[in-house]
Image: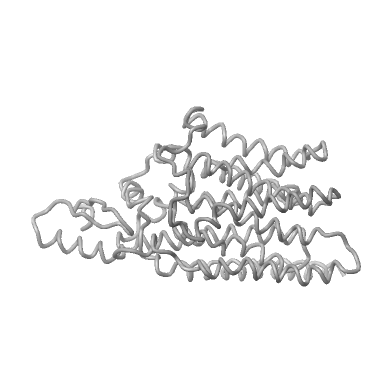
């Protein structure tokens, strides 16, 4: 009997691992499909400098300017040893892999609170299909922090995740905080539960302290004034001619999250799932508000609020009290809301002009190498998509350093 139970447990673990692999691979392929036209391009906001610097050797200071950039600045060190012409494709694929991993973690988080595999898959897709990734986030090392931020807030909103996997949860929260300056917002869902229930477990407090540690690290690097003022030259007013993409990204997610909060406030009777919905909605509103205050209007700031708002609606539907009609309502509401949210995801599925304009990176490297070998020059200007240039030394391009 004991041997039979061990075999069953072994098969269950194997099944779980295979399922996780299938889900991760599905998310990864979706991301690659979304970013297929941008795979061989380097986003101009990051530029090629981070890869060139990494190829010259390890430097601690690159992780500390202007704030802690743990994962963002680690990516170039993993890519740098590869041939220069492959850096754009390799970096894009690695970033897609990280986003897919974040989607998988969200999927696994929801597996703890819902019995439906479909619902858990939809939860992960809220991260993978968020429409506002298409403008500048797909395959961009600089945008990894938003995927980690979203994941850590989801973890914070589901207490059973922290209690069942405290080390993993705390590690993800700390890494998110050391990669995104907004990472400390992950404590909001957990602190909401502390205020509501007047108690938190020791594992949850450990998570909170780890996340807040990252806040103090960044304040130490930036300074209180810099942390409070945010970016210079912020765009705070929507420009004339801005289309549905910008208006929906700026106003849509916080409006949906506020709607969830109002609905639950009116209903008042909160169960554990409703607590999670509140935590996700608070995370959406807080990230949208603080990102706007510190950074202004930018598509990258729409990603986390949009994903969290969609998840809050999903959990809100699931949190409805069990009644004779609740199952029917869920069967109608979940597919209906999912289809509604898929409309912008389908409209802005593929990488936008910002990531697809200009020549590919590999073609520019090939052109530059040809110039270096045929002309008496020491440096060549390479165009960075979608705009701007980067100067590279011929000795660097032809492999002499």
Q: Quadrant of residue 256?
A: bottom right
* Relative image position of residue 365 (x, y in whole percent): 25, 62
Q: Which corner quadrant holds the N terminus?
A: bottom right
* Relative image position of residue 323 (x, y in whole percent): 90, 64
Q: Residue drawn 52% across and 70% down?
A: 29
Foreground of the two, 37 or 231: 231
View extreme (front): residue: 240
* Relative image position of residue 269 (x, y in whole percent): 86, 50
- Asked if 246 appears above or below 217 in the picture, the reply is below
* Relative image position of residue 189 (x, y in whole percent): 70, 44
View extreme (right): residue: 324
Q: Residue drawn 83% across and 72% down?
A: 328
Q: Quadrant of residue 25?
A: bottom right
Relative placement, left or right, of 372 versus 333 is left
The number of discs equals 0
Foreground of the two, 110 or 71: 110
Q: Residue drawn 48% across and 33% down?
A: 229
Q: Residue drawn 44% across and 65% down?
A: 351
Display coloring? one colour
């Amino acid at each position: 009997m004991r041997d039979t139970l061990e075999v069953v447990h072994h098969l269950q673990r194997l099944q779980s691992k295979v399922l996780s692999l299938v889900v991760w691979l599905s998310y990864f392929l979706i991301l690659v499909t979304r970013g297929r036209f941008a795979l061989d391009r380097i986003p101009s906001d990051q530029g090629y400098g981070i890869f060139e610097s990494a190829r010259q050797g390890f430097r601690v200071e690159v992780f500390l300017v202007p704030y802690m950039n743990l994962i963002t600045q680690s990516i170039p060190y993993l890519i740098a040893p590869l041939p220069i012409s492959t850096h754009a494709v390799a970096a894009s694929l690695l970033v897609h892999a990280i986003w897919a991993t974040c989607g998988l973690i969200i999927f696994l988080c929801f597996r703890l609170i819902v019995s439906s595999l479909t619902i858990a898959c939809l939860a992960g897709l809220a991260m993978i299909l968020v429409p506002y990734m298409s403008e500048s986030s797909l395959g961009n090392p600089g945008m990894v922090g938003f995927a980690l931020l979203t994941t850590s807030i989801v973890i914070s909103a589901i207490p059973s995740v922290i209690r069942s996997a405290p080390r993993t949860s705390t590690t993800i929260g700390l890494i998110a905080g050391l990669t995104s300056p907004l990472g400390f917002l992950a404590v909001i869902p957990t602190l909401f539960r502390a205020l509501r229930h007047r108690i938190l477990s020791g594992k949850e407090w450990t998570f909170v302290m780890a996340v807040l540690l990252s806040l103090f690290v960044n304040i130490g690097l930036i300074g209180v004034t810099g942390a409070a003022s945010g970016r210079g030259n912020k765009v705070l007013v929507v420009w004339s001619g801005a289309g549905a993409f910008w208006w929906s990204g700026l106003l849509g997610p916080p409006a949906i999250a506020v709607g969830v909060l109002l609905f639950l406030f009116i209903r008042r009777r909160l169960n554990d799932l409703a607590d999670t919905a509140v935590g996700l909605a608070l995370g959406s509103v807080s990230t949208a508000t603080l990102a706007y205050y510190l950074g202004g209007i930018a598509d990258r700031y729409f990603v986390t609020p949009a994903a969290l708002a969609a998840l809050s609606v999903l959990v809100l539907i699931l949190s409805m009290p069990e009644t004779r009609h609740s199952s029917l309502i869920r069967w109608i509401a979940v597919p209906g809301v999912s289809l509604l949210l898929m409309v912008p995801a389908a409209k802005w599925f593929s990488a936008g002009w910002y990531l697809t304009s200009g020549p590919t990176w590999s073609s520019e490297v090939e052109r530059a190498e040809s110039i270096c070998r045929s002309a008496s020059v020491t440096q060549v200007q390479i165009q960075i998509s979608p705009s701007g240039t980067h100067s590279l030394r011929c000795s660097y391009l032809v492999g002499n350093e």
